[in-house]
Amino acid sequence: MVSYKTFELPQNGNSGKSDITISDIESSKSSKNEQKIGHKGLSVLTAAVFITGEMAGSGVLALPKAIVDTGGSIGIVLLVVFCVNAGFGGHCLGNCWNILEERYPEYRTSLRNPYSTIAYKAVGKCGSMIVSVCIQITLFGAGTVYLLLSSQILQQLLRHYLPNISFCIWFLVIAVILILPMWLESPKDFWAVGVTATLTTVLSCILMFVQMLLDSEFKISHVKHKVHNFHDFFLAFGTLLFAFGGASTFPTIQNDMVNKRKFSISVVIAFTVILFLYLPVAIGGYLVYGEHVQTNVAVSLGHSPLSVLANMLMGIHLVFAFLIVINPVCQELEEAFDIPCTLDWKRCLLRTIIVFIMVFVGESIPAFGKILSLVGGSTITLLTFVFPPYFYMKLCSQKNANWPERHLPLYYKMYLWELIIIGIIGGSAATYNAVISIFGSGMARPCYWP
């Protein structure tokens, strides 16, 4: 136990008593230590790079097809609206964590599951469990999409050299190759991963847009567009939602920042960059290829050194993104099964099993667009558009004599509820149509089906 004493210290050169206790000195030491640790964290710009690298990538490949299926101008408007709303959701999450640090000193250090902690303090244990499950489903689904896209891109790159190797075989090959890196330490701890993921995405999008301009010669006037039904519209709706589905990692990125209260600035920078990456590719794919655009726009690009390089860069991004997003899923299960953090056979076995489960899902539903729409309309909608504003309002409504009072204006609450209602209605419709598409008459034939 610590005994508390009063020290006699000089004040401004004069002797006298100062009521400074050991607890005050320890608090000062703790504050200095936190500052030293904080300087090792992410800056505003680095956090924006991580957000951009985490979000931009797989979503952009499906955007041109989504714009076509939503009717062109409507899809473009939705893309911009979703970008603004998803960015505002990230702002709400950042404010939620600031509130938790303000009220609970124990949360002023780095936590492993900050989003679930926000849910716990806002709505209780049940909400925390729902958030945790949604995050795992989102990351597992995103990882499966990354594997499917990587396989499709690799097949596209090697189709002239290995024409007899199918997409399904490439999917299995890539999954097996990535098993070994999954056994090792998480790549999310290295800043170079976030920078590489961002740079490869930016360069790939630029090259794809340039290739679209080259493909557009004498084509735009001959491109056909048709009116699509509600089924296609809401499938595309889920795709657009998926394109902004990085909220599950926002609190973790904020937790690693030097100044966490500047997280909103990082969000604004990241979403501005993402929108400028998305719009040219989405509009270009819609105008140049029209109804002939593939779910993965990379397959629609004309064959040239530019398109090959763009596909290679996007493939690199997808590999990095897969290793990043699948690691939290592995860690959560390892903690549930009490598996040590060290590299041993239990860890290797569990992670290998996870890969083969993803292989089974991907080989059973070899259509990444449908998985993308399903995840985008369900868990991503909840984590990005529904939970952040709801948790923010709940935290602001909580009262305590020791807490600063927070008051949200009526117009602000109306906007938050609008986000929630639109997210629930649109996400439910997208999820329903994705399920119908996966298991209905348009079901893709599994790779192992004779």
Image (tube, rainbow, N blue to C red):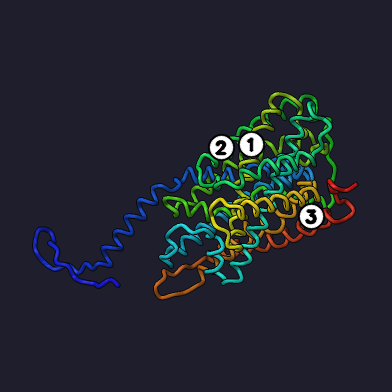
Q: Tell me: 73 left or right of 259.
A: right
Residue type for callout 2: Thr
- In this view, the residue in front, 109 or 228, is 109
User: Is the residue under label 2 in contact with that under label 1 (CB below 8 Å)?
Assistant: yes
Q: Tell me: 135 left or right of 47.
A: right
* Position in image of residue 221 (x %, y %): 81, 30
Residue on which disc 3 sits:
434
- The residues tagged by marks 1 and 2 sit, at their Cα atoms, a distance apart of 9 Å
Write down the quadrant of residue 159 in the picture: top right
Residue at 73 percent across and 34 percent down: it is 154
Residue at 55 percent across and 48 percent down: it is 186
User: Alpha-carbon neighbours of circle 2 within 10 Å: few (<14), some, or many (≥20)?
Assistant: some
Residue on which disc 2 sits:
196
- The disc placed on residue 316 is 1
* Position in image of residue 40 (x %, y %): 41, 47
User: Alpha-carbon neighbours of circle 3 within 10 Å: few (<14), some, or many (≥20)?
Assistant: many
* Position in image of residue 120 (x %, y %): 55, 68
Residue 344 can be seen in this image: yes
Tag 2 or tag 1, which sits nearer the N-term? 2
Foreground: disc 3 or disc 1: 1
- The disc placed on residue 399 is none
Tag 3 or tag 2, which sits nearer the N-term? 2
- In this view, the residue in front, 411 or 381, is 381
Residue type for callout 3: Ala
Residue type for callout 1: Ile
Name the outermost residue toward the front: 345
